[in-house]
Amino acid sequence: MPATLTQLLARPELGLRLLTPSSVGDPDAPLAWAHSSDLPDPTPFLSPGQVLLVTEPPEDAEPYVRRLAEHGIAALGFGTEVVRDGTPASLVEACTRHGLPLFEVPYRTPFIAVVRFVADRVAADAYARSTWALRASRAISLAALRPDALGAVLSELSRQIERPVALVGSDGAVSRSYPSGGLDARARRALAEAADPLLRSGRRAAGTVGTDAGPFALQTLGAAGRLRGVLAVGSEALDAAAQQVVTGVVALAGLALEQTRAADAARARLRTAVWRALLAGDTAVAASIAEPVLGALPASPLRVAVLTGATVAAALDWLEANADGFFARDGSDLVVLGDDAAALALAMRFDLRGGLSSNAGLDALPAALEQAHAARSRASADDPVPSFDEVASAGMLALLHTPDARAVAVTALQPLVAADPTLPGVLRTWLDADGVYDVAARQLGMHRHTLRARVAEAERLLGRDLGSFPARADLYAALRAAA
């Protein structure tokens, strides 16, 4: 460990004498270095935790000592018999008031001896910490060879740095923690809440969080877009050597998690094969392939959810670790067989958009898939996973509310708008009244003959006879789509 004031004063060859009471300051705090300076204000050239050695007594001890104490100087050494005999009483009193330990350096002791003692202890401590870091890293590397490589690495890290270590999985829950029982429910909840935004970002990131078990440093594991989890390490008073060991573990933990990616990829390909067999109607074959590895296929009736978005891969990883039902990758889409609540929760978690089919059996999946695709076309930020039941209940005309339909409708109605911007509204009221002139005229507040003239004008502009049902239906659809 580095030198302390207690150790420094205990060296008989130095002959140092403490002038302030032993209760002043912290005599066991580590000393970062020792410097000598007789500047009126040496603080710009000093760092907290250092010892300052002086021979020239300050003209006014009070502000001088206050500046040193506020800067975090660990102790002040006064060399006697160089400028004056003895240490000024005003300096002793000021140091006592401001909590700055003051010791006397006799004339026979050169300042360089004090500096060398501190420097030697700092160097010895740095060497000891480097040696410890090498030994700790070697022990952790050997732990990575055990069957449960990830668990062994994290357990060994916790033992080496003597801090709690936890792993938050891609599902946002604490899946492992060391030492066993070291984190209570509140600490685990705090870690999960702090890791959640890092996982949702989909990017490599780091953060910190305070818990009942102390502060933790957080670091995501895995590649951007496919994060595998978040490593949480107790970070209270970790020095550079311990940080170096933790950095190595981040790489090892990421590697251990990536080793499962090949198995996950194989399972993903198997899921896709089962899904295609189901779509082809080979239900028995799909069930026989899925059951040994993926488990039994879901029972009918069920719903088909089709989800899409930039984070489909991350959603697949999460499902692989947490879901019991069937899901598969279908091109760029994610297909989930389940219920609307599960699909909505998945879409909200990974910012996906999709659609949900009506209830269907395994033998009717192609039709259910078409329903899910149709519902997905109606997805929005307010309704990320609409159900086909909602789409069907809105009727055929509701399908007109698409950008393509609106573009066609606006073009078809352009002659009317150019001639009279109010004409589309007149026609909409007339058609809503089933083409009955008397009823529509009363609603519009005009004479029925005037209305007939307006309709005749519209026929001329559109170049079609609005007396037939198909023509009226086509015009009504255009008016609805353009609204």
Image (spheres, grey):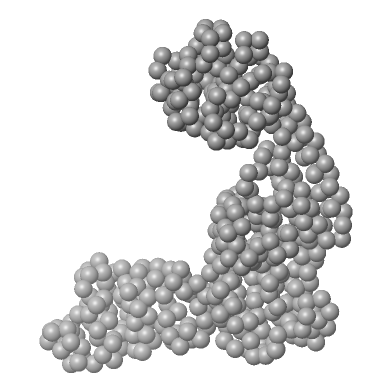
- Residue 73 in sight in this render: no
Image check: 210 left or right of 422?
right
Image quarter of residue 244: top right
Name the residue located 25 percent from the left edge and 66 percent from the top edge.
Answer: 418
Q: How many marks?
A: 0
Of residue 14 and residue 21, the one placed in the foreground of this image is 21
Image height check: is 149 above or below 91? below
Image height check: is 188 above or below 74? below
Image quarter of residue 136: top right
Quadrant of image for the C terminus: bottom left
Name the residue located 77 percent from the left edge and 65 percent from the top edge.
Answer: 264
- Residue 155 in sight in this render: yes
Image check: 245 left or right of 56?
right
Quadrant of image for the N terminus: top right
Image quarter of residue 480: bottom left
Name the residue located 84 percent from the left edge and 47 percent from the top edge.
Answer: 139
Where does the image place residue 206, in percent across and percent down from the top left?
60, 49
Where does the image place residue 86, in percent across and percent down from the top left?
53, 13
Where does the image place residue 306, in percent across and percent down from the top left?
60, 74
Where does the image place residue 325, in percent across and percent down from the top left?
69, 79
Image height check: is 55 above or below 464? above
Of residue 345 and residue 414, the one placed in the foreground of this image is 345
Name the residue located 40 percent from the left edge and 68 percent from the top edge.
Answer: 407
Of residue 465 and residue 121, the one placed in the foreground of this image is 121
